[in-house]
Amino acid sequence: MRYEILGPLRVVGGGGISFISAPKIEILLAALVIRADHVVGTDQLIDEIWGDRAPRRATAGLHVYISELRKFLSRLDHPNNRIVTRQPGYLLNLGSDDMDVQLFLDRVAVGRKQARERCHEEASDRFESALALWRGPALGGLGAGSMIEAFVSSVSESRMECTELLVDSQLQLGRHREVVGRLFSLVTEFPLRETFYRQLMLALYRSERRADALKVYESARRTLHDELGLEPCRALQDIQRAILAGDDRALLDTCAAV
C-alpha cells in the first residue's frame, strides 16, 4: 500500500485509490504519515486537528478518530493494524508500505549525484520522474497545525529545488530553447525566485534573444524592489553585465557553474 501526499492525501492499495472525506480524520492521517515510524504525541495531534479551539473532550474525540482511521485502513485489504498506540501518543508503522514523498526525495538525491558527476542526460530524466509524482500542492492545501505546515513548506521547497536542478541540467545539455516557455511560467508563478530569472536570462541569450534576456532582468529588478525593497542578487547582476558586454566567456562560465 502507498500513502500519497504529493497532492491531495490518498491511499493506494489493492482495491484502488481511497480518500478520507472527514477533514479531521484526514488531518490525523496526514500527521501520522509525515511522521511515519515515529510516535506523535496526543497533545500534538490534538493541536494539529483543532488548534486553539480544542474541545474539552478532545482526547476522547481523538480516540474516536483513531478508531475510525483504523477501520478505514482495514477496509483497504491492509493485512495488519498499522496504527499503534504507544506512549505518549500513536505511531503509524509503515512496514512494507511506502510513501510517494520518499520516492520523490530518493529520485532527487540520485539526480543530484548524477548532475555532480556531469551525467546530465540521466539527471534530467531522474528529476523529471521525481516531479511527475506531484499531483498538486502537498496534501492538497490541507489546513492544519504547525507540524503539517512545516512539512508542507519543507517538501514544497524540495520540489522547487528539483525544478531548478532539472533546468540546470537541461541548460547543460544545450536545451535552451526548450526551457524558455517553462521558465516564463515559473517566473510568473514564483516572482521572487531569483534562480528562475537567472536561468531564463541565460536560456534567452543562448537562444539569440539578447534583448528579451535584458528585459527579464529589468522585470526581476522591479519586482524585487517593489516587493522586498531589494536589488537583484549578485548572480543576476553578473549575468546582466555579461549580456550587456557580449561576454560569451563569462556566460559560458555561468552555464558551467549551473
Image (tube, rainbow, N blue to C red):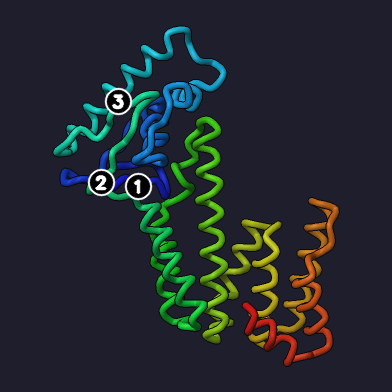
Q: Amino acid at mark 2?
A: Val
Q: Quadrant of the C terminus?
A: bottom right
The residue at 26%/39% (across/down) is 18
* Residue 216 pos. (x, y %): 74, 71
Residue in the picture at 34% in, 40% down? 37
Q: Secondary structure at mark 1?
A: strand
Residue 255, given in percent of the width and then of the height, sits at 64, 83
Residue identifier under label 2: 12
- 182 to 82, vertically: above or below: below
Residue 161 drawn above or below residue 10: below
> Considering only vertical position in the picture, is 107 above or below 254?
above
Residue matched to label 3 = 85
**Type of amino acid under label 1:** Glu
The image quarter in which residue 257 lies = bottom right
Crowd band around label 1 with a 10 angstrom C-alpha radius: few (<14), some (14–19), many (20+): many
* Closer to the eye: label 2 or 3: 3
Residue 20 seen:
yes
Query: What separation in Å lies between label 2 and label 1 (alpha carbons)?
Result: 7 Å
**What element does badge 3 sit on?**
strand
Label 2 crowding class (10 Å Cα cut-off): few <14, some 14-19, many 20+? some
Quarter of the figure with residue 85: top left
Q: Is residue 3 above or below residue 44?
A: below
Mark closer to the chain start, 2 or 3: 2
Q: Position of residue 208 (x, y in %)?
A: 68, 88
Estimate the spatial distance between the alpha carbons at disc 3 and disc 1, rounded to whole Å.
23 Å
* Residue that extends furthest to the top in the rendered view of this protein: 56
**What numbered label is drawn on residue 4?**
1
